[in-house]
Image (cartoon, grey):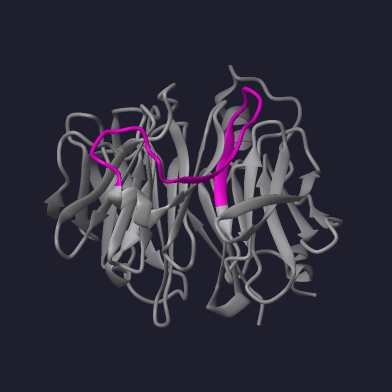
Amino acid sequence: MWFEALDNPPSRQIELIADGEDGITGVGFLTTDDHHGIAIASSADGQNSESWVLTFPLDGTGEVHVLEDIALFGDVALLLGGKAIATFANEESGVALRTLTGELIERLPDDIDGQCLAGFNDILLAGGTGNGQVWIWAIDSKQLLADVQTSEWKQQIVAIAWHPSGDWLVTTSQGDGVRLWSVAKLQATPHGDMATAESAHVTGENRMYYAPTFSSDGALVAVGCGNGEVLLFDFASGQLRLRHTLKSSEEEVMALAFHPTLPHLVTGSQGLLSIWNTTTGELVITHAALVRPEPVDDDDDETYEEFSSTQIAGIKFARGGKLFVVARSFTVDLWDLA
């Protein structure tokens, strides 16, 4: 089975050089017919310090670009066939599209931020803000297609994801659960008004919800939780129906990926990869090669760095399931599965 390759060292490992201890703050993947890439943002203190973005193609060819002296906060998206990135710096600098070498392509309107970002087919960019707004930007026409307040409580949007069809968006936030949105209705909602575009809302306890992820056929969506659970939903006709609640760890789950052809969901928590059967909800295997060291002493920089290096920030299958990528706080591991 494909996951047996994880018992061996990665086929390729890329060491990231971060200015500070927080490591990766955002990971953006792009998979098209001719390009598989990853963009990584890192910040020295997780807020407005100098940061950098590393972009490279997953097939091991091409040039690795490092963007220095750009203050970043939060997420990063890889766009335009891997030739551009979308980043959010801070409220003053806002959201910007840049080339891989850092040159500014365009800056989005000042009144939107992008603490989480997601691109769709190089034509649309969606973002979620710290005060609960969701917006959609048309890259070619440079127009703001939607900008709505999603909740009267103005809860921060933690993560956002596109359905493969481009017709739906799913967002997560702390305490406000998981929300599914019709893109067409979002675009028809008056600027700044409470959204009437909500199709489904899964309310939750006062906890964090991370990394909403659709399966390649769009029939399933998975969401990681701060209490170690993963919620697996069936998606059909604009509705979410809970299929399974999965849990293999007490640590927050911040990265998920569906296998493109097999009924497998991979979830990543603190140093732990869990592989689930999406049909039965059963745990197939736990890959513990990255389990964090114990104990952890926050005052010990060396131990802290070792602990932080096991935080899984992103997971991705590429090349039709022939490549598996795990982005951790300071490294990117790639396994050839062919």
Residue 327 shows up from this direction? no
x and y percentages locating residue 79 in the rendered image: 31, 63
Is the N terminus in the top left, top right, bottom left or bottom right quadrant? bottom right
Horizontal arrangement in the rendering, residue 333 relative to residue 83 (left or right): right
Q: What's the residue at 24%, 45% (across, down)?
A: 68
Residue 43, quarter of the rendered image: top left
Q: What's the residue at 23%, 41% (across, down)?
A: 70
x and y percentages locating residue 145 in the rendered image: 23, 52
Is the C terminus in the top left, top right, bottom left or bottom right quadrant? bottom right
Identify the magenta region.
189-212
Magenta residue check for 179: no
x and y percentages locating residue 267 in the rendered image: 68, 51
Residue 306, quarter of the rendered image: top right
Q: What's the residue at 15%, 41% (across, down)?
A: 109
Q: What's the residue at 62%, 46% (across, down)?
A: 223
The one of 38 and 122 positioned closer to us in this rendering: 122
x and y percentages locating residue 199 in the rendered image: 51, 48
